[in-house]
Amino acid sequence: MQTGTYISLAAYFILMLAIGFYAWRKSTSDSEGYLLGGRNLHPAVAALSAGASDMSGWLLLGLPGALYAAGLVEAWIGIGLFFGALVNWIVVAPRLRQQTEELGNALTIPQFLANRFPDKAVALRVVSAVIIVAFFAVYTASGLTAGGKLFETSFAGLFGAAGMSDYMIGIWITAGVVLAYTMVGGFLAVSLTDFVQGCIMVVALVLMPIVILTGGTDLDAAANAAAAAGNANYLSLFGGLTVVGFLSTVAWGLGYFGQPHIIVRFMAVRSVADVRTARTIGMSWMGVALIGAVGVAIAGRAYAEQNGIVVEDPETIFIILANTLFHPLITGFLLAALLAAVMSTISSQLLVASSSLTEDFYRLFLRKQASERETVNVGRISVLLVALLAIAIASDPDSQVLGLVSNAWAGFGAAFGPLIILSLTWKKMTGAGAVAGLVTGAAVVAGWIAMGWNAQFMGGPGLYEIIPGFVAAWIAIVLVSNLTGKGEASAA
């Protein structure tokens, strides 16, 4: 790797740290500033921040890897995500922005649920916080795994640290930079860096397929190689698609309603009126980014086949192409785009997990009268603790980015998705119903994974765990709310 690449990456890291310092000077004096940026995000920043924190390393590693290996049929994941995100912006965003401010100016999702159902406030805050911290540790680990793969593929042997692999060095460097600007600048730093990172990501995803295809690469090379390997439907959106396979891919869209690191952006946007503008910007960005990811995978496989490039890990195709096709300065930019995808999500997840530890444990049980400065400092320590747990999980170099993401995505989607939708739209929902849905969704997802039914179900392909988890949580909320409705009062 040449000097130009190092220059680009260094410039990227410096920019992220500078944004963190700016945010520290501007908005970290109190909890609302540190955790929600003062509820004053510009719609463009809110939109790209939600998109960038959503997509993570799976957009440039996991999804292209799945498409590279299995073909265009994996694009249904992206299609399901697109429509899930659209419904999330329409149904959840405006209501959550309005109700979180009206119900006690809630700064976290557990706080909102506690204010919405005061009779079960403690149970909801504690259970929500436990689920958030547990699943975000896994989710953050997926981002660190992506960072480790980047350094392992692109910087092999460069650092030469005795007793430490390139993979682990990558994990520690990625975590170190994210921790620096997240701990210092809080939500505003995370959101502003997400905005910049979202711009970098979409440019990279558009640039790479265009360069490949304008260079004379023939997509038939990918189809022919896949056919030789037994997949004659490589370029077909429906080839080999089963009912279970279709449901498992499009069901990714259900996860959006319950992702705390995404929906917290709705709480921070400048006003309810700005939500529509943010939605338009965010969905446009997402559409272009997903199409670009498909292009990277399919065009990338064609290029690799035509040029005899051996790709041992399909999830590294973006990195391989960046190192092979471009001038070192551009390579550095593209690798920065991958880091942007990884770091934007990690920072958002760390901050949300930190906010739950701070507001829903520390302030609730240990120091109810904690000052604003003390609370912010505890939040910074919590960011560090969750990051260390995620590093431990990510330390296995055989971890698959898409696998870790899918488990955490399903956990949040099933536990919080039905809960958030119904709490915002159904006045008859009760606190007991909320607790039942939260516990049921998380338990069903965990049990489904433990039984291996996400890999193989009833003698056929696995059924994605978010489907039974989401359905079971929805039913639990409705049943328990109807049974307890007459004896409970809510803040709706």
Image: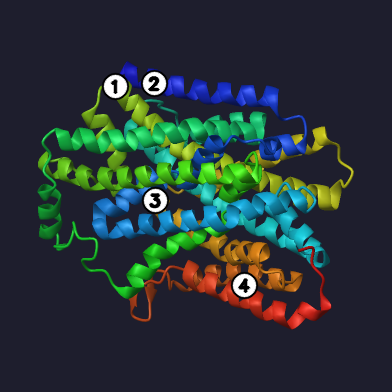
User: Is label 4 in a helix, a strand or a loop?
Assistant: helix
User: Is label 2 in a helix, a strand or a loop?
Assistant: helix
Q: On the image, numbered disc 4 is attached to which residue?
A: 440
User: Is label 1 in a helix, a strand or a loop?
Assistant: helix
Is tag 4's residue or tag 3's residue first in the polypeptide sequence? 3
Q: Tell us which disc is closer to us: 3 or 2.
A: 2
Image coords of residue 54 (percent x, y): 49, 47
Residue at 37 percent across and 31 percent down: it is 335
Image quarter where the C terminus lies is: bottom right
Q: Amino acid at mark 2?
A: Ser
Image quarter where the N terminus lies is: top left
Q: Amino acid at mark 3?
A: Asp
Q: Is residue 185 depicted above or below 453 in this figure? A: above
Q: CA distance from mark 2 to mark 4?
A: 47 Å
Is tag 3's residue or tag 2's residue first in the polypeptide sequence? 2
Q: Tell us which disc is closer to us: 1 or 3.
A: 1
Is tag 1's residue or tag 3's residue first in the polypeptide sequence? 1
| Disc on res. 398 | 3
Image coords of residue 418 (percent x, y): 59, 67
Horizontal side of 127 relative to 202 (left or right) equals right
Q: CA distance from mark 1 to mark 2?
A: 8 Å
Q: On the image, numbered disc 1 is attached to which residue?
A: 328
Q: Amino acid at mark 1?
A: Pro
- State yes or no: discs 1 and 4 in contact (Cβ < 8 Å): no
Q: On the image, numbered disc 2 is attached to which residue?
A: 8
Is tag 1's residue or tag 2's residue first in the polypeptide sequence? 2
Q: CA distance from mark 4 to mark 3?
A: 31 Å
- State yes or no: discs 1 and 2 in contact (Cβ < 8 Å): yes
Q: Is residue 361 depicted above or below 270 in this figure? A: below
Residue at 53 percent across and 71 percent down: it is 469
Q: Amino acid at mark 4?
A: Thr
